Image (cartoon, helix red, strand yellow):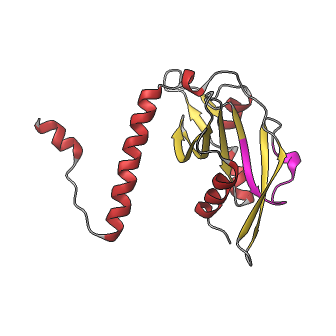
Amino acid sequence: MIKIEELIHAYIHSHCDFEKELVLTNYFQADWEADILVIDSDGFSHEIEIKLSKSDFKNDFRKSYLNKETGEKFLKHDKISCGDYVCNAFSFLLPMGMVDQSLIPEHCGIIEFYHNVDTWDTEFYLLRAPRKLHEDSYWKLNDKDLFIRKMALNLLQRKMEIKGKHEELIFKNPFEIKNKK
């Protein structure tokens, strides 16, 4: 069975243009983590959610958001379908035939994949393009400078995480450091 990291690698390297698109994986936006987030040069954003099991797929429709100001609770796909979501498009990336297409809401794109374990080739099939949810640029809805700072911090944290797997690292609590200054 292909691992999710291998699937992501295969997809982004066969479908993304790194010279024209910003491609992020496992990126938190709003209250959910995007498995793949692609933002083109015009600011058009597309979230791709990977589901490898039927139960994981079904659970995606139970995810909710709590508005801190009003206390109102919203389901993730209710927000997405009405255009009240940061991304311009949303798609599911699924194993071939895992979910009947009629169970996938019309606003969602459908990308299926077939992974050949003998050759380690993975093929992707766009079954339905995602519906454009709204016209706003990702940068109109997000502070670009803050986004870049968060990306830089994330890169630093991942570097330390990888380095820490090879040797023991000891870091002081950053909150204690700030309090002493």
In which quarter of the view is residue 113 placed? Answer: bottom right
The x, y position of residue 124, in whole percent, is: 77, 56
- Report the residue at 71% width, 23% height from top: 134
The x, y position of residue 117, in whole percent, is: 73, 75
Total numbered labels placed on residues in the image? 0
Choose between 103 and 174: the one closer to the eye: 174
Q: Is residue 97 left or right of residue 50?
A: right
Given the current orientation, which residue lies at the most extreme bottom position?
A: 118
- On-image quarter of the N terminus: bottom right
Would residue 96 be counted in the magenta stretch?
A: yes
- Report the residue at 64% width, 52% height from top: 12
Q: Is residue 69 left or right of residue 21?
A: left
The x, y position of residue 180, in whole percent, is: 11, 38
Given the current orientation, which residue lies at the most extreme front position?
A: 19
Report the span colored magenta.
91-104
Q: Is residue 130 left or right of residue 72?
A: right
Would residue 1 be counted in the magenta stretch?
A: no
Choose between 106 and 121: the one closer to the eye: 121
- Report the residue at 32% width, 64% height from top: 164
Given the current orientation, which residue lies at the most extreme left position?
A: 180
Q: Is residue 112 left or right of residue 120?
A: right
In which quarter of the view is residue 5 placed? Answer: bottom right
The x, y position of residue 81, in whole percent, is: 74, 31
Q: Is residue 24 above or below residue 71?
A: below
- Report the residue at 28% width, 69% height from top: 167
In which quarter of the view is residue 130 placed? Answer: top right
- On-image quarter of the C terminus: top left
